[in-house]
Image: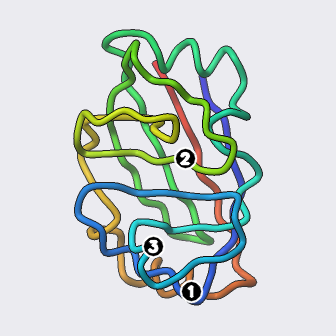
Amino acid sequence: MKFEIEFSGHPNVRSNHQKSIEITKSTSLTPSGDCIVGVGATLGCAGLPENIKTRLRTRGAHVTCTIRVEEYEFIVRGEGHPDLLLEDEEDIVIRKSSYVCPRTLAIRCDKASDVMPREMVAMLRDPGIRGRFEIAVD
């Protein structure tokens, strides 16, 4: 089961957080938002289809998030969990830790924003660039 969210770049994308990756519906970004790789997302966790939410809340669910920007793709693998709330209207966060809050989409992920290819990060600093955040749950 797959679902895709579009987002835009921003001049303040840093992508150097060691524990998470975030996209947000907000169109503003300060330099301190160092896990944020995209703004102007089409939805936050709350807007995900119910069938995706149900799968994400299944114990042992495998989640693959693929971030695509032009010819680049960055793949992150993690897990779903029954405690996921998926209620935040603005944000989607994938985490290396097991921390769960309304913004959390996946936990125990194998990567964070600090290892995203720097060429891709440079592209995401262009506010005119569009990216795609694909969620696949099995």
The alpha-carbon separation of the residues under discs 2 and 3 comes to 13 Å
Residue drawn where x is 56% and y is 86% of the image: 125
- Residue 125 is marked as 1
Residue pictured at 41% horizontal, 30% vertical = 63
Mark 1, other Cα within 10 Å: few <14 / some 14–19 / many ≥20? some
* Position above or below: 95 against 16: above
Is residue 75 shown above or below 85? below
> Would you name the residue on which mark 3 appears?
33
SS class, disc 3: loop
Q: Position of residue 9 (x, y in %)?
A: 64, 77
Question: How far across and how far down the image is residue 67, in percent?
Answer: 52, 57
Which tag, 3 or 1, sits closer to the chain's start? 3
Q: Secondary structure at mark 1?
A: loop
| Amino acid type assigned to the residue bearing label 3 in the image | Gly
- Which structural element holds mark 2? strand
Residue closer to the observer: 99 or 112 = 99
**Sooner in the amino-acid sequence: mark 2 or mark 3:** 3
